[in-house]
Each structure stands twice: as structure tokens, then as C-alpha cells.
Amino acid sequence: MQFLEQEISQITATTWQAMLGLDIHPNMLPSVLEPGEGFLTGRVEISGAWNGVVLLHGTSQLARSAASRIFACEILDVTQQDLMDAVYELTNSIGGNIKSLLPQPSQLSLPCVYDTTPDIVVVPEAGQVSDLVFDCQGQPLFVSLWKRFDG
């Protein structure tokens, strides 16, 4: 499962630094993810010459930190909508940059963001071709790329 992992890692680190001013570091999968911790998942579809999905999956705490930086507000002032909007923007940026590495022509859908659990998220009818885990401020961020079986 080495498909574009070095490039995706660089895209994620560059996006994180440019949009948030935060460093992000590749990490091993945490041994235990807290079941009580809320997670948000951003999902964007790629279709065309290459068909698949990019998922960005992280804790609500990490999304709150990102939102406070994107919207220049205090962490305590971040709303649920701000959390969703921040993950939306990060998913769109990272997904768009990943799309540019794939066979063309390909199109990027609008991202969707939803609440999830700490479980690793799967994409039905697709196989995972890249799976990266990062650490930002002690919080995990998962970035995965899935290729559709039919595409």
C-alpha cells in the first residue's frame, strides 16, 4: 500500500502549514483511539480517468484547533459549523492536490463532512491504496486514498 504515499504526505504537510501555520508529522497508527472522542471525516470523490475517494479523518479537537486558525477566532468561540467548514476546506485542498497527481482528465466533487467514530472509515466498493497517519499537536489525522473497483 505505497501508492503515492510520499506525495500525499508532502501535500498534507504543505497544506497544513500553509492553511493553519501548524506542523504535522507522519506517525504510526495510535495503539488506542479513545472511544469517547468525537471524530470528523471529510470525503471527496475523484472521477474520470481515475475513480476513487480521498478521506480526511481526525478528532473534533484537531478540527477545533484548525477552525480557530482558519477563522482567526478563539478555540472557545468555534462553532460546530466552523468545525465542519474547516474540515471541508482542508479536505477540498488536500483532495484537489491529490487529484492533480492522478491520471487526467479527472474531476473533484464537492467535499462532504460528517461526524464519525474513532473506527477506521471504509469506502464500500473500493480498495484502500494509501493510508497515512499524522500527528498534529498530539492529535491523530488519517488521510487515505481509495480506488473504486469499477474504475
Image (spheres, helix red, strand yellow):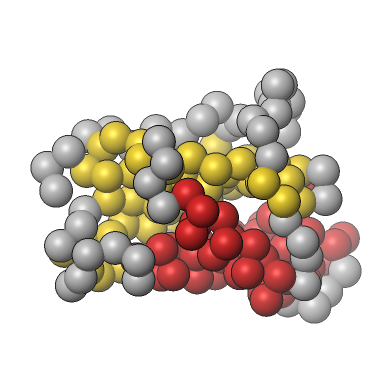
The front one of 25 and 86 is 25
Closest to the observer: 81 or 127? 127
Q: Is residue 80 left or right of residue 99?
A: right
The N terminus: image quadrant? top left
Residue 60 relative to residue 53: left or right = right
Left or right: 130 in relation to 56 = left
Left or right? Give the position of 82 relative to 11.
Answer: right
Q: Is residue 42 above or below residue 75?
A: above
The percent position of residue 62, horizontal first and vertical second, equals 73, 51
Percent coordinates x, y for residue 56 in the rendering: 52, 50
Q: Is residue 78 visible?
A: no
Q: Residue at x 54, y 37 (%)?
A: 116
Residue drawn at 47 percent across, 49 percent down? 5
Furthest residue in direction left, as rendered: 150
Q: Is residue 51 visible?
A: yes
Res 97 → quadrant: bottom left
Query: Which residue lies at the image location 72% right of the left edge and 63% below the top edge?
Result: 66
Quadrant position of residue 125:
top left
